[in-house]
Image (cartoon, rainbow, N blue to C red):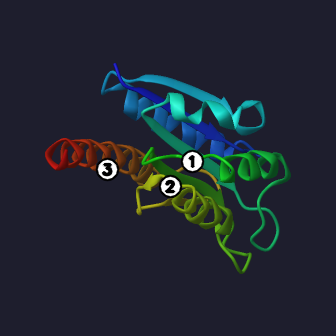
Amino acid sequence: MAKALITYASMSGNTEDIAFIIKDTLQEYELDIDCVEINDMDASCLTSYDYVLIGTYTWGDGDLPYEAEDFFEEVKQIQLNGLKTACFGSGDYSYPKFCEAVNLFNVMLQEAGAAVYQETLKIELAPETDEDVESCRAFARGFLAWADYMNKEKIHVS
């Protein structure tokens, strides 16, 4: 059974809500899923997973949240060797750099050698509407379809 990690930083609960919608969706595919707050996560464990999804809110004018900074720096030091990853988060359009922390994680994961799903999920505040919930579910399904395709491509290339 494939293992997935969903790790997230959430101050108000918005990103946590997104994480659990994603988790519920991925559970439909019989994955072994860990859902862990980012400040409780040891970055060195990432490579023990088949799939890693990282969620964050954006602090201030585009900054990483304090509780995600150490994890971010630790992940930068790891060689992720094609690990299938994706990024999601919540933000507030009243700030000039909406969900910028999601972009920061996305770029960092690429630089660390991960295979990064290019469709990021960015939700305004909380996933309260049916449309927001469906966006979260579609993101999870899309990531898994992409990761499965990447796995098949890897098999064909070898």
**Amino acid on which the number 1 mark rests in the picture:** Gln
Instruction: Provide the residue designation for mark 3.
Output: 142
Helix, strand or loop at label 1? It is loop
**Earlier residue among tags 2 and 1:** 1
Instruction: Provide the residue designation for mark 1.
Output: 79
Helix, strand or loop at label 2? It is loop
Q: Residues within 10 Å of mark 2 (few under 14, many from 20)?
A: some
Q: Position of residue 42 (x, y in %)?
A: 71, 32
Does residue 104 appear to the left or right of 134 in the view shown?
right
Tags 2 and 1 touching, CB below 8 Å: yes
Looking at the image, which residue is at 73% across and 61% down?
58
Distance from label 3 to label 1 (Cα)? Answer: 25 Å
Quarter of the image for the C terminus: give it: top left
Q: Residues within 10 Å of mark 3 (few under 14, many from 20)?
A: some
Foreground mark, 3 or 2, reads: 2
Q: Is residue 42 above or below residue 14?
A: above
**Amino acid on which the number 2 mark rests in the picture:** Gly
Helix, strand or loop at label 3? It is helix
**Earlier residue among tags 3 and 2:** 2
